[in-house]
Image (tube, grey):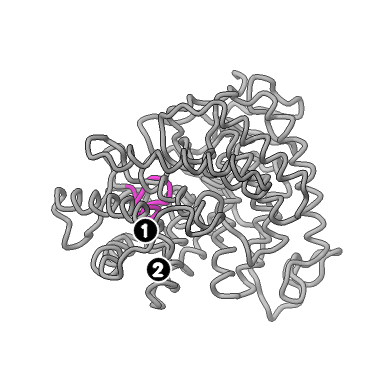
Amino acid sequence: MPAVTAGTPVTEHYCDCDNCGPQQSSLRLFTLSSVVVMGENMSKRLKLLSSDGDPEDRSFHNPHPDWDPGTASADSEADEGPQGPIEDGKVSASFERRVQSKIKDLLLQMEEGLKTADPHDFSAYTGWTGIALLYLQLHRVSGEASHIQRALDYVKRSMRILNGRRVTFLCGDAGPLAVGAVVHHKLGNSAESKDCLSRLLQLQASVLSPDGDMPDEILYGRSGYLFALLYVCKELGAEAVDEAMLSQVVITIIESGKSFSAEQKKFERCPLLYEWHKKQYVGAAHGLAGIYYMLLQPSAKVHPDMMAELIRPSIDYIRHKRFRSGNFPSSLSNESDRLVHWCHGAPGVIHLLLLAHKVFKEDKYLREASDCAEVIWQRGLLRKGYGICHGTAGNGYAFLSMYKVTQEQKYLYRACKFAEWCLDYGTHGCRIPDRPYSLFEGMAGTIHYLSEMSNPEASCFPAFEL
């Protein structure tokens, strides 16, 4: 079995879900409690297996009983009260101690593994900027100065290797520049923060260019740049980005969707339609749900008429594509109910539905978000691993979002049970991604999710939620 390599080139980071892009990533299996290195040096605590097993068997059976407020013995633990990780409607102190202990352990493993990481990958998705985002999150929840300093270290590492090939937050220069602006701002480095912001805003020209072949999705397209602008507005203040500039990006995305919808003769049914690699994807990473989610953000300031006439009917169009299970197809042409990932399936679409409920004040969106949550609970412990793009941690964020909207303890309990699964990192025989310590594929994303247990009300899916 070959050693795990440093990863794919910076030019293209497919979401590694065996579904999108012109090539599929090779995956490996592991069984021991430690996770693998990112690079050529394999951890001695790993046991690689030779077979990927049944490709259609994508999730583990969920062994946890569901939340039952009327039963005092549901999933009881000797050291954790009658509802396991929940006590008096909140995450129990004993469970939080377990989580914090695991975070410390995983951070040590992650830092050791990053010594052999691809030195040229600056991306938020699989590279140094993603690690900076993790340390920003740890600083937010703990207030420890050491975490913001580590974030700065990784920002500086990213900034030295920007290549100008992409302009998005997750896979391009916009991510390091936006995170750099925020980190420097928090440290009081005004000149450095302004320089990062200025360079970020200069990327707009390529985003608006009518001559380019830029897509509109989040990983590589205009919506990914839009997120970067909204992110700095959230962290630095609305005045960080001129409203006219923001509007130009929004209008460009909308006009692109209108044009392609008309070309496909679907404007009456779906006024905003988009494709990536010749497919009309539905999910959050490459598809309609992710694009609509960005346009629906209040800080994007889309005109109410466009909301009503373009975005809302487009959301309703993909709502009607859902399976009976409550899950969603990976693309409009795919009739297979297989993927339950943030990148493809209910765990990504649920965030769109919850935001649509907030914006349009209609219960149908919340009902269908609840249906998404059910299929995630049943099929969300993924053999793909523990990451956030296509792993258990990313699926757990769906429950945190449901909890924030509904305040139902059931969803907090479910989020904690998915976190509990992640506490046994490396013991389930999951597949190993090519960048096993990264934010979106690997351990950094799991740590990010575990850190949310200290304050679930303030949870935020990185590089996606605002």
Residue type at the position of mark 1:
Leu
Residue 447 visible to the viewer: no
Separation (CA) of disc 1 from disc 2: 11 Å
Badge 1 element: helix
Quadrant of the image occupied by residue 366 = bottom left
* Residue position marked by numbered label 2 in the rendering: 356
Indicate yes or no whether the magenta region holds residue 289: yes
The percent position of residue 182, horizontal first and vertical second, equals: 59, 48
The magenta region covers 281-292
The percent position of residue 44, horizontal first and vertical second, equals: 76, 25
* Residue position marked by numbered label 1 in the rendering: 295
Which residue sits at x=35%, y=45%? 222
Which residue sits at x=58%, y=31%? 158
The crowding category of the residue bearing disc 1, from other C-alpha atoms within 10 Å (few below 14, some 14 to 19, many at least 20), is many
Indicate yes or no whether the magenta region holds residue 414: no
Residue 253 visible to the viewer: yes
Asked whether, in this view, residue 212 is left or right of residue 159, the answer is left
**Quadrant where the image shows the N terminus:** top right
- Find out whether the residues at labels 1 and 2 contact each other: C-beta distance under 8 Å: no
Quadrant of the image occupied by residue 127 = top right
Residue type at the position of mark 2:
Ala
The percent position of residue 4, horizontal first and vertical second, equals: 60, 24
